Image (spheres, rainbow, N blue to C red):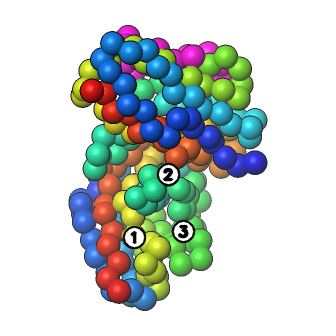
Amino acid sequence: AQTVTQSQPEMSVQEAETVTLSCTYDTSESDYYLFWYKQPPSRQMILVIRQEAYKQQNATENRFSVNFQKAAKSFSLKISDSQLGDAAMYFCAYRRISNFGNEKLTFGTGTRLTIIP
Amino acid sequence: DTEVTQTPKHLVMGMTNKKSLKCEQHMGHRAMYWYKQKAKKPPELMFVYSYEKLSINESVPSRFSPECPNSSLLNLHLHALQPEDSALYLCASSHRGLSTGELFFGEGSRLTVL
């Protein structure tokens, strides 16, 4: 079974600074997706960034970037120029790729990010 | 339209009540999901529907009864719930094909069982 581990229950960062959230996962599959979702107090789960395992290039989305180390099964999220609106619970998630397309999303335990003004 | 819409947003029910949660998407997704999320915890998968057929049931108690009447709608029927069933219930959908792989989530229905 696949597992996702986030070892930082809480993190805080000064506004405009950079913060990195850690995630490791365990799988025997070679093809899969990895995601970072954020869940603000409004509670909707919002996709921040995705990474396809077959791609060696790290994904970036504006101020958000990942460091994907497939051999080490590590997938960290870097947030640059942190903004107050980035405050949320961040979940790392794994999804196996299959022909059926109904694979579940497996979540880590989450990291609560606080932005200090 | 890239939304998953869930109703109601809040629901309070007694242990003897029967109620339903509803989820709707118009993105042409053929896989739909119910997740349960307790406070400060990650979402836990309950059910997956693929092409309107139940494909995954994560050993959920029978007091939760899912239904997928068509490709756009997903219901969760609730009956004889317990106070420990109080949680945020999230609906999600995804492309059946490989596509971008992500799940699109609704805002959730917060359920309180008295």
On screen, A88 above or below B6?
below
- Dividing the picture into quarters, in which one does residue B29 lie? top right
**Span of residues in magenta:** B48-67
Q: Residues within 10 Å of mark 1 (few under 14, many from 20)?
A: many
Q: Which residue is tagged 2? A: A44
- Dividing the picture into quarters, in which one does residue A87 lie? bottom left
Image position of A57 (left or right of B70): left
- Label 3: which secondary element: loop
Label 3, label 2: how far apart the Cα atoms are: 26 Å
Q: Which residue is tagged 1? A: A87
On screen, A43 above or below A18?
above
Whole-percent x and y of residue B51? 68, 21
> Viewer-proximal residue, A58 or A8?
A8
* Mark positioned earlier in the residue sequence (1 or 3): 3
Q: Which of marks 1 and 3 is in front?
A: 1
- Label 1: which secondary element: loop
| Same-subunit check for callouts 3 and 2 | yes
* Mark positioned earlier in the residue sequence (3 or 2): 2
Q: Which residue is tagged 3? A: A58
Whole-percent x and y of residue A11? 27, 71
Q: What is the chain letter for disc 1?
A: A
Residue at the spot x=42%, y=26% of the render? Answer: B46
Label 1, label 3: how far apart the Cα atoms are: 23 Å
Query: Marks 3 and 2: CB-CB under 8 Å?
Result: no
Residue at the spot x=74%, y=40% of the render? Answer: B27
| Same-subunit check for callouts 1 and 2 | yes
| Same-subunit check for callouts 1 and 3 | yes
